[in-house]
Amino acid sequence: MSGLYKVLQKIQPKPGMYIGKASVSDLFHFLVGYEFARGELDIEPTEWENDFHEIFNLGCKKNITSQHLIPGQK
């Protein structure tokens, strides 16, 4: 497994210790910082990390879109 997977395992039981509060928004910003730091250190993301980021970002976009629909609209 990747370094990101291990980090997420640590965050899950105590999110407040790592990201402030248990929110998708705070997790998103943490992950952006994590990706940036690894890029600055020239650490290539693993296939698992790339897949995770793609799925996570799609889920965030879907959630944001569904929250901004006009009432009664699907």
Image (cartoon, rainbow, N blue to C red):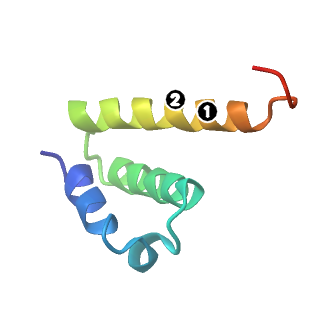
Task: Examine the image and state in which quarter residue 70 appears.
Answer: top right
Q: Quadrant of the N terminus?
A: top left
Label 1–label 2 contact, CB within 8 A: yes
Q: Is residue 38 above or below residue 68?
A: below
Residue type at tag 1:
Lys
Marks 1 and 2, Cα distance to the nearest angstrom?
5 Å
Nearest to the observer: residue 74 or residue 64: 74
Q: Residue furthest front?
A: 72
* Quadrant where the image shows the C terminus: top right
Which residue in the protein does label 2 denote? 58
Location of residue 37 with respect to 68 vertically, above or below: below
Q: Residue at x 26, y 39 (%)?
A: 44
Q: Position of residue 32 (x, y in %)?
A: 49, 51
Please name the residue shown 47% across and 60% down the image: 30
Residue drawn at x 52%, y 75% is 20
Residue that sits furthest to the top in the current view? 74
Q: Amino acid at mark 2?
A: Leu
Label 2 packing within 10 angstroms: few (<14), some (14-19), many (20+): few
Q: Where 18 sits versus 52, above or below?
A: below
Circle on res. 17: none
Taking the spot 20% from the left edge, 58% from the top edge, the residue there is 6
In the rendered structure, find residue 61 and report the number of the disc placed on it.
1
- Compared across the picture, whether 19 is left or right of 43 comes to right
Name the secondary structure under disc 2. Answer: helix
Residue 18: x and y in percent read 40, 73
Asked if residue 21 is positioned above or below residue 51 in the image, the reply reads below
Assign a secondary structure to mark 1. helix
